[in-house]
Amino acid sequence: MAQSDYKNQAEKYEFIADQHGGYYRHDFIDHAYLYNLYFPPEDVFDCFKNQIHDLVLNYPVAQDVLAALVGNLINQPPERIVVGNGASELIKIVSGHLARKVIVPVPSFNEYVNAAPTGRAVEFPLEFPSFHLDVDKFAAQTIKAKADVAVVVTPNNPTSMAIPKFDLMHLAKLLASHDCQLIIDESFIDFVEDRDQTTMEHEIERYPNIAIFKSMSKAYGICGLRIGYLLTANSQFANAVRQGIHIWNINGFAEEFLRILPDFREDFINSCTQVMEDRDTLYEDLRTNLGITIYKPDANFIFCRLPDSGASGPEVTKKLFIEYNMYIKHCQEKTLPDAARYIRIASRTKTENSNLVDALVSILGPKNK
């Protein structure tokens, strides 16, 4: 179905539910995709406009320069960095080609499992119903399965929960002598209250079996530019991933963004603070007004469980879209018990979040009904 072929809101929903982007072309409020609405500032776009001819007409730089640009941003040497066309390119290389067997706690970001060849991915269920990761059990299963790549997403998607740093260090130690590379996906780390006390960036020298993945789309609000990176002190692993990267995998606009980004550090920090404030307000409003289970978020989205009786996640998602032109994410396709009872809500502006809560109250009923 072409984007202009839907005849009503119900058909529009069916079309959107089958897409993986391009939402801005279809005029609805997107509480499904997870990105920073307050960054980048307009000055970034002015930089693009002023150099648009050069950016379009010339080849971009290759991997060595890109790694140096990211290294300047995160204060790390370039030899520890591999820059991808979004984190998804790096995930495809690792899960799809390098890993003999990959293990992932679930529910989580599906691409780590989806990218793996059939029979080479193991799903490890998180504790239910808390969705916390028991790192001792996870390590034991990793070793038993003889996985050579273990993946942990923190804060996790869709649960929005961060894993304590001491748990991650303990996990790295447990796996260190078992030829297992630990991938820590920190794509949402900039929305954690105490980022510097949560990130593992500063620990990679102590734990060379760690590699950090970071999608820049989420925190920096640049989904269309497609930038992600890998950070590790394991030169052998970094080189193996680097071999899978095409020579010009990043376009000129993404390169320019990396060049100018250090000039906007303060704007970025302020934008993340605003995202966290809006998210916390949404969390409290959902808890106050709706009689559903709301998990405390560490990222820029909120994980919820609907009651056993009443509408399911897919039904609520569809009704919200058809009646209010708002789109959230149901979790029916995630690997977890009663998956159809869960929804994930991306935080937007305070006004949009408030409107969403009102719409959900009208669909689900108030808390004290």
Image (cartoon, rainbow, N blue to C red):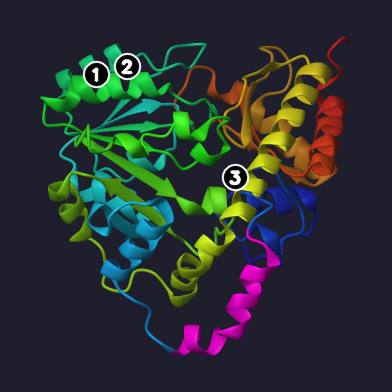
- 303 to the left or right of 366: left
Disc ID at residue 34: 3
Which residue does the image show at 52% across and 11% down from the upper left?
129
Q: Tell me the tag on residue 135.
A: 2
Q: Name the element at disc 3.
A: loop
Please tell me which of labels 3 and 2 falls first in the chain.
Answer: 3
| Rendering quarter of residue 108 | top left
The structure residue drawn at horizontal position 24% and vertical position 40%, both measured from the top left corner, is 118
Left or right: 353, with 30 as reference point? right
Task: Tell me the kind of residue under disc 3.
Answer: Leu
* Proximity of marks 1 and 3: CB atoms separated by less than 8 Å: no
- Asked if labels 2 and 3 touch by Cβ distance under 8 angstroms, the answer is no
Q: Position of residue 180 (x, y in %)?
A: 17, 31
Position of residue 50 relative to residue 228, above or below, is: below
Q: CA distance from mark 1 to mark 3?
A: 29 Å
* Mark 2 residue type: Val
Mark 1 or mark 3, earlier in chain: 3
- Mark 1 is on which residue type? Ala
- Mark 2 surroundings within 10 Å by alpha-carbon count, few (fewer than 14), some (14 through 19), many (20 or more): many
Residue underneath mark 1: 139
For residue 2, side relative to residue 336 (left or right): right
Separation (CA) of disc 2 from disc 1: 6 Å
